[in-house]
Amino acid sequence: MVFVGVHGEWGRIDATQADLGCGQDRESIYKAKPPAPLTCYECDWRLHLVHKTHGEYELWFLRHAANAPHCEARLAGEGMAHHLLKLDLAHHARAAGWSAEYEVASSDGSWRADVMATSPDGSRKVALEAQMASSSITDIKARTDRYAAVGVEVCWFTDRKTVPWLDAVPSVQIARPEDGGPVQITAGPARFSPEWCHDRSDCDWNSGCVDGPLPCGGHGKWLAVEPFALDRFVAAICTNTTRPHRLRAPSWEKDETWRWITRRYFELEEEQVRATARRKQVMERLAAIQQRQREARAEAERQHMAAIEALLQRQKALVKPVVEFAFHEAGAYPTVGRDGIPEYAMGVPLYVRGKPYAVICPVASRVTALRDALAPLVFFAATEYERDRIAAQAARGQRIEVLTVELPPPAVPAQREPGGLTVQQAVSRMFGLDRM
């Protein structure tokens, strides 16, 4: 069963058209005696015109004579569903004001369209492909690319329930109602349903990647369209009001998803795509700022911990020389108090005969608030630099002694020697957390 053949005198004929597409009468070759000189364009075998009624369809087609050889045209045209769908596609294209021809092949034979629809001015050609048999994604994509290479648009139509390539190329799924109603488009077209936060400058769906408000990138998505008649869809293709489009906004589907959409839905998606890009830019900028802030805080914390560790090392190194200094000066061995006491500006207090006598390495910034209480005591420092910092905060004329000692190299803040404090313990003691 094929639609197109070659007449010995008239050339190409189309059995579905009353004038055979060449201005001649069907009746002149239907059951003609002798048989009309009709042959197959593919295998040159003799054809004859057939007329049948199938439901509401008046079918005119060409059939190969007996004992025909293997023929690609014959194989491509077999199957009533395939035959009827091609009739529908051509009919609807013509109803939209376009011309439609069956089995149109390229000059090099690289493709052959089931129905080639052409606009009245010839500026657009659309191959309407009835793909009723199973085919691989690779094959359908390759055939689609061959059309695109010569500027021919294409839409694939199938009635198969499971179609692996439906998302991969411009295509739709159809269904023929059992009650004989018009063929329906059941999958392929889509509509975009927009959704935005009430305040677009502060998205309710924060990703949690950054702190602070982010602009709304849109939460719309693509939805399937309710089934509608095939003639509306073909007319929409011809009028260019629906176009194949690779979805960009989230569709909850595959990475590569083609759907047929209208301009309005493209614009709605475009608005969300741009908003999503803006949101991403803001998020990346905030993330970079906050990362730098975290790094700065971490560096400040590291330096703070290193300073505390250095303080503990200085205090530890000065304990012995300060005890000896106090013994020679006071004539009695002092008692070394607990280190890191807030009342002594986080320094180590020394007591002689039960009374406060000195403070080893007090923290300069803490001396100010305790200036009057600590004024009678002797301060000990490990370096001139430390002495100057303490003197700047201490009471006028406060006695500050510098005992030069060999200090150990800076230690890793998290480490401690047996019997000593870790940096975290020192911090806790500094802020009085160990007493809570």
Image (cartoon, grey):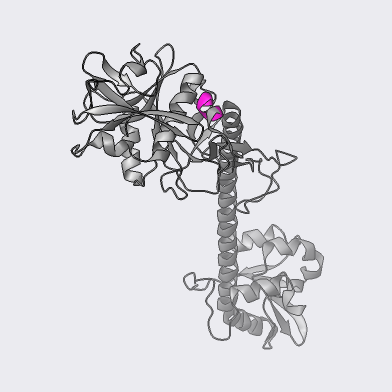
| Of residues 307 and 189, the one drawn nearer to the viewer in this rendering | 189
- Residue 8, horizontal then vertical, whole percent: 21, 17
Residue at the right extreme of this rendering: 372
Is 320 displayed left or right of 5 in the figure?
right
Is 46 displayed left or right of 265 in the figure?
left
Q: Is residue 384 above or below residue 281?
A: below
| Of residues 138 and 338, the one drawn nearer to the viewer in this rendering | 138
Q: Is residue 35 above or below residue 121?
A: below
Which quadrant holds residue 213?
Answer: top right
In the picture, the quarter occupied by the C terminus is bottom right
Which quadrant holds residue 429?
Answer: bottom right
- Residue 41, horizontal then vertical, whole percent: 23, 26
Q: Specify the segment rendered in magenta.
A: 232-236
Query: Is residue 125 visible to us here?
Result: no
- Residue 20, horizontal then vertical, whole percent: 35, 18
Query: Is residue 273 visible to us here?
Result: yes
Q: Residue at x 72, y 64 (%)?
A: 366
- Residue 142, horizontal then vertical, whole percent: 31, 38
Magenta span: predominant SS is helix
Total marks in image: 0
Is 26 displayed left or right of 336 in the figure?
left
| Of residues 408 and 332, the one drawn nearer to the viewer in this rendering | 408
| Of residues 128 and 309, the one drawn nearer to the viewer in this rendering | 128
Is 309 displayed left or right of 428 in the figure?
left
Q: Is residue 81 above or below residue 430?
A: above
Residue at the front extreme of this rendering: 33
Q: Is residue 222 magenta?
A: no
In the picture, the quarter occupied by the N terminus is top left
